[in-house]
Amino acid sequence: MTAILRTALVVALAVASIPAVAAGQDTSPASLLRRIELLERRNADLERRVRELEAVIQSEPSQGGPIPASTKWKDLANWRQLRRGMKPDQVRALLGEPQRVAGGDFTYWHWGQAYVIFYSGKLDSWLEPQ
């Protein structure tokens, strides 16, 4: 029993003597000042970039209007290039932006009476325009 207690005591002392700072971390004041300076430079850079983006937004305000409708979906040749398993970007390149999107387990993109159905992010089926 005493051997177990002695072992537990030695282990507790060993654990208590492990430094709280990981190896390679220097907590000297000079190191901390360098880290603060680096963070201040990064912060100044981010603030500059945000100001530039805000200037672009203010100089070219969004019209808030609808996305211009594409007529690519009306061309049956584009529909005939569809293949199961295509990604949404590939379908968008062929047919243009959908007029309406309905989500859920299956995602439906509508153009008039025509539509495509995606399942798990891949083209599953479609109905061409009449």
Image (cartoon, helix red, strand yellow):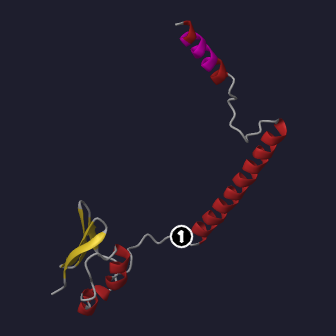
Query: Does residue 93 show up magenta in the picture?
Result: no
- Give SS at disc 1: loop
Q: Residue placed at 23% from the left, 91% from the top? A: 76
Q: Which amino acid does label 1 sit on?
A: Pro
Q: Where is residue 6 in the image (x, y as percent from the top left)?
A: 60, 11
99 over 14 or under it: above or below: below
Image side of residue 121 versus residue 32, left or right:
left
First to last magenta residue range: 4-12
Q: Position of residue 8 (x, y in %)?
A: 57, 15
**Quadrant of the rendered image containing residue 72:** bottom left
Q: Residue placed at 64% from the left, 60% from the top? A: 50
94 over 87 or under it: above or below: below
Give the main secondary structure of the magenta stretch.
helix
Q: Nearer the viewer, residue 3 or 11?
A: 3
Q: Position of residue 51 (x, y in %)?
A: 66, 61
As drawn, which residue projects farthest toward the right?
A: 30
Q: Residue placed at 19% from the left, 84% from the top? A: 128
